[in-house]
């Protein structure tokens, strides 16, 4: 039995301890999940919709308490934590209002048959492995369509946010989900294969690192289970010479520094057209200086600590390695325990850690491009392909460039973000499959052809 501790990254205090489940306990939970699926899949859309709606109400009712839990466990500033809870409630409402329509039969007109159509059936238990950086949002964005569609789920959350995992399970139980429909499993990584191998588990969804995704995807392949992998990103933020510079800079700093830079869709590589490089750089520095760092429970603080000491140390290491290869540090870059001071690096070249790797912290890298073609080439020179932002006043040009970008999403004159109305996911080492929207709800459905002849 392993003991997990949740630790407040702001002051290092221990919040709680959790005992891992035994192999026998996990097997019982898997059996409960199978029994729950047999009943849950037979419930009406109306019944499932009511569960989602009530869960949204509970989230809004308990927003302050739940946001504080997020902040204590992983250091997100309280204003961002409250916004995360609101986004979760919105997503639950969105699927409650639209999910049934997304899963209606699709009629195929064919003179060769009496009736032909495509039906969408739930497949079973979906095993989810979720990260700590958005401890409620990452869970709700897969769980809302999963449960609405008639599937059930097991959640393995990150150990440093087990309190959040416990709270989410409690919310769905209070909202009226059957016993076993949503279960939180406190396990170590050595039990993951046992769960994926089980016959009741028919799908695996993971949001996390490239390394974790590779290992879990191999297991899903070994046991022939459908998988969705939402992995890392090294998102580009392209600013062309004709962009609204003032607006672009404000959004750029927000896109890099939100959640202390700990988001897969944070802008990480800022690719700036040469003629506006100095103006962009100067304005970016001024915006960084406005960031107020401190106790994340304070409403007027913009940035708290990173979620764990090892994470802050990794960003510090990537910074130092890049400096040794010739990068220039213009501001920040020093670390105090879990706090990493917001930083801007310039003179970035290929081979540097900040050019080649995902940087999961409040460190921005500024790269100069001679023209828009070179900007796109730099953006596409990445092992990742999650999201890209393009800033220009020429919307026709922007849409043309967007089609040449190798990423799952391209946002023009806007911050890259997830929205339940839009598909979310990446290509290359950013993973495969999609979450959210009509596309996401069908990922773990049996897309069944029904052909009826007279």
Image (cartoon, rainbow, N blue to C red):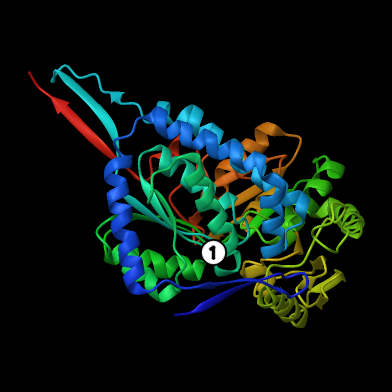
Q: Identify the residue at horizontal 18%, vertical 20% (top origin).
A: 115
| Pointer 1 residue | 383
Q: Is residue 225 above or below residue 188?
A: above
Q: Nearer the viewer, residue 375 or 68?
A: 68
Q: Is residue 59 above or below residue 199?
A: above
Q: Is residue 423 above or below residue 5?
A: above
Percent coordinates x, y for residue 333 in the rendering: 82, 73
Percent coordinates x, y for residue 208 in the rendering: 53, 63
Q: Nearer the viewer, residue 213 or 390?
A: 213
Percent coordinates x, y for residue 230 in the rendering: 50, 56
Confirm whether residue 258 shows in the render.
yes
Q: Secondary structure at mark 1?
A: loop
Q: Identify the residue at horizontal 40%, vertical 66% (top origin).
A: 216
Q: Nearer the viewer, residue 242 or 222?
A: 222
Going by the picture, which residue comes out furthest to the left? 454
Percent coordinates x, y for residue 167 in the rendering: 57, 54
Write down the quadrant of residue 17 in the picture. Answer: bottom right
As drawn, is 148 to the left or to the right of 132? left
**The N terminus lies in which quarter of the figure?**
bottom left
Confirm whether residue 416 shows in the render.
no
As drawn, is 31 to the left or to the right of 241? left
**The C terminus lies in which quarter of the figure?**
top left
As drawn, is 177 to the left or to the right of 333? left
Q: Identify the residue at horizontal 28%, vertical 52% (top origin).
A: 34
């Amino acid at each position: 039995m392993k003991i997990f501790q949740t630790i407040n990254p702001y002051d290092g205090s221990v919040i709680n301890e959790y005992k891992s489940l035994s192999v026998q306990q996990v097997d019982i939970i898997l059996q409960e999940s199978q029994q729950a699926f047999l009943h849950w899949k037979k419930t009406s859309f109306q019944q499932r919709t009511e569960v989602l709606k009530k869960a949204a109400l509970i989230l809004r009712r308990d927003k302050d308490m739940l946001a504080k839990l997020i902040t204590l466990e992983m250091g997100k500033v309280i204003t961002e934590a409250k916004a995360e809870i609101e986004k979760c409630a919105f997503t639950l409402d969105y699927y409650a209002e639209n999910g049934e329509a997304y899963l209606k039969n699709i009629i195929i007109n064919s003179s060769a048959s009496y009736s032909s159509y495509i039906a969408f059936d739930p497949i079973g238990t979906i095993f989810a492995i979720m990260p700590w950086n958005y401890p409620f949002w990452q869970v709700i964005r897969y769980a809302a369509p999963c449960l609405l569609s008639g599937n059930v789920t097991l959640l393995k959350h990150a150990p440093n946010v087990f309190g959040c995992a416990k709270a989410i399970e409690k919310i769905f139980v209070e909202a009226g989900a059957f016993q076993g429909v949503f279960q939180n499993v406190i396990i170590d990584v050595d039990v993951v294969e046992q769960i994926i191998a089980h016959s009741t588990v028919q799908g695996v969804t993971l949001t996390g690192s490239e390394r974790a995704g590779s290992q879990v995807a191999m297991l899903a392949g070994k046991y022939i289970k459908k998988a969705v992998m939402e992995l890392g990103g090294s998102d580009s933020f392209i600013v062309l010479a004709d962009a609204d510079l003032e607006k672009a800079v404000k959004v750029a700093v927000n896109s890099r520094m939100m959640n202390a830079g700990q988001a897969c869709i944070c802008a990480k590589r800022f690719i700036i057209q040469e003629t506006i490089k100095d103006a962009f750089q100067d304005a970016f520095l001024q915006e960084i200086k406005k960031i107020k760092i401190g106790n994340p429970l304070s409403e007027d603080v913009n940035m708290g600590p990173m979620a764990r000491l090892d994470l802050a140390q990794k960003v510090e290491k990537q910074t130092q390695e890049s400096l040794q290869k010739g990068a220039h540090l213009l501001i920040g870059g020093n670390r105090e325990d879990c706090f990493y001071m917001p930083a801007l690096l310039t003179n970035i070249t290929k081979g540097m850690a900040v050019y080649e790797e995902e940087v999961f912290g409040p460190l921005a890298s500024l790269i100069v491009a001679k023209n828009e073609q070179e900007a796109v080439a730099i953006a596409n020179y990445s092992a990742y392909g999650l999201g890209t932002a393009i800033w220009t006043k020429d919307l026709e040009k922007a849409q043309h460039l967007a089609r040449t970008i190798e990423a799952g999403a391209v946002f023009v004159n806007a911050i890259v973000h997830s929205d339940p109305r839009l598909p979310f996911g990446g290509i290359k080492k950013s993973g495969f499959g999609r979450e959210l929207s009509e596309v996401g709800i069908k990922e773990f459905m049996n897309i069944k052809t029904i052909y009826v002849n007279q």
